[in-house]
Image (cartoon, rainbow, N blue to C red):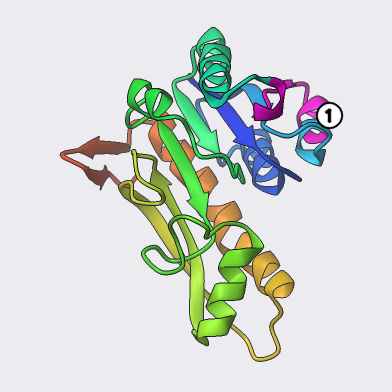
């Protein structure tokens, strides 16, 4: 059984997709051990509560400096001994010590087709604003393992989504969530939980089945 810790920063729509996937059987061999938010009062914490999942806040604002926060976050995750850490709309840059400790055991969902519209400063609604400003006809989402860089880790899945005339960033964001994010992240978790997805020499290997 894959023990998963989910990290969020907001409403938790991707968290809900994971909860629903486990309940509906599209994600198997998986249990959600804890949901951690770096911001208090976000709706994602309510989603965790409703699903009966341990949930807590570890916020940088509650610590004297970043080093103290990094240690607290790492210690909190260690208490739950997760097999996989899932960044589901988590806007926090993870400390290097945490990424190294959980190498190839952290995945992220990013709302574009990496390497487009990614890297420092490209997060949330800003990604869709960038896509519309550039005039692309296709965007999408990428699920990838996390490494020391920003959106640079090995790619697991990508799914394309059409950009339509008249789209606003908010409309496009919703379509990318519904047609890509909520599909490929649960699929990645299920693949990891059942041994179909592995990382070797910095590349993802997928055994379909």
Look at 46% across and 55% down and name the residue there. 120
Q: Determine the image quadrant of residue 102.
A: top left
Q: Determine the image quadrant of residue 48.
A: top right
Horizontal placement of 155 versus 88: left or right? left
Check if residue 54 falls in the magenta segment: yes
Q: Which residues are magenta?
A: 46-62
Horizontal placement of 157 versus 51: left or right? left
Q: In the rendered view, would you say 108 is above or below 46? A: below
- Closer-to-camera residue (27/174): 174
Look at 68% across and 27% down and name the residue there. 59
Look at 51% across and 15% down and name the residue there. 71
Looking at this view, name the residue that lies furthest to the bottom: 165
Residue to which mark 1 is pinned: 50
Residue 67: horizontal and vertical position, in percent?
A: 51, 21
Look at 55% across and 8% down and name the residue there. 79
Q: In the rendered view, would you say 142 is above or below 164? A: above
Badge 1 marks a residue whose secondary structure is helix
Check if residue 28 falls in the magenta segment: no
- Closer-to-camera residue (192/89): 89
- Closer-to-camera residue (151/187): 151
Residue 191: horizontal and vertical position, in percent?
A: 40, 39
* Residue 69 appears in the figure: yes
* Residue 162 appears in the figure: no
């Amino acid at each position: 059984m894959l023990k998963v810790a989910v990290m969020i920063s907001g409403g938790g729509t991707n968290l809900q997709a994971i909860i629903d996937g486990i309940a509906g059987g599209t994600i198997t061999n998986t249990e959600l051990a804890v949901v951690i938010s770096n911001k208090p009062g976000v709706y994602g914490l309510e989603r965790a509560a409703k699903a009966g999942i341990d949930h807590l806040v570890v916020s940088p604002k509650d610590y004297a400096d970043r080093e103290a926060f990094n240690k607290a976050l790492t210690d909190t995750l260690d208490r739950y001994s997760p097999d996989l850490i899932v960044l589901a709309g988590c806007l926090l840059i993870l400390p290097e010590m945490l990424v190294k400790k959980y190498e190839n055991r952290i995945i992220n969902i990013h709302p574009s087709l990496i390497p487009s519209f990614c890297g420092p400063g490209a997060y949330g609604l800003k990604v869709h604003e960038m896509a519309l400003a550039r005039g692309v006809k296709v965007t999408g989402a990428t699920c990838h393992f996390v490494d020391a860089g920003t959106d640079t880790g090995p790619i697991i899945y990508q799914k394309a989504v059409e950009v339509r005339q008249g789209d606003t960033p908010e409309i496009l964001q919703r379509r990318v969530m519904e047609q890509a994010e909520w599909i490929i992240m649960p699929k990645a978790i299920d693949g990891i939980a059942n041994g179909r997805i592995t990382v070797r020499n910095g590349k993802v290997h997928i055994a379909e089945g």
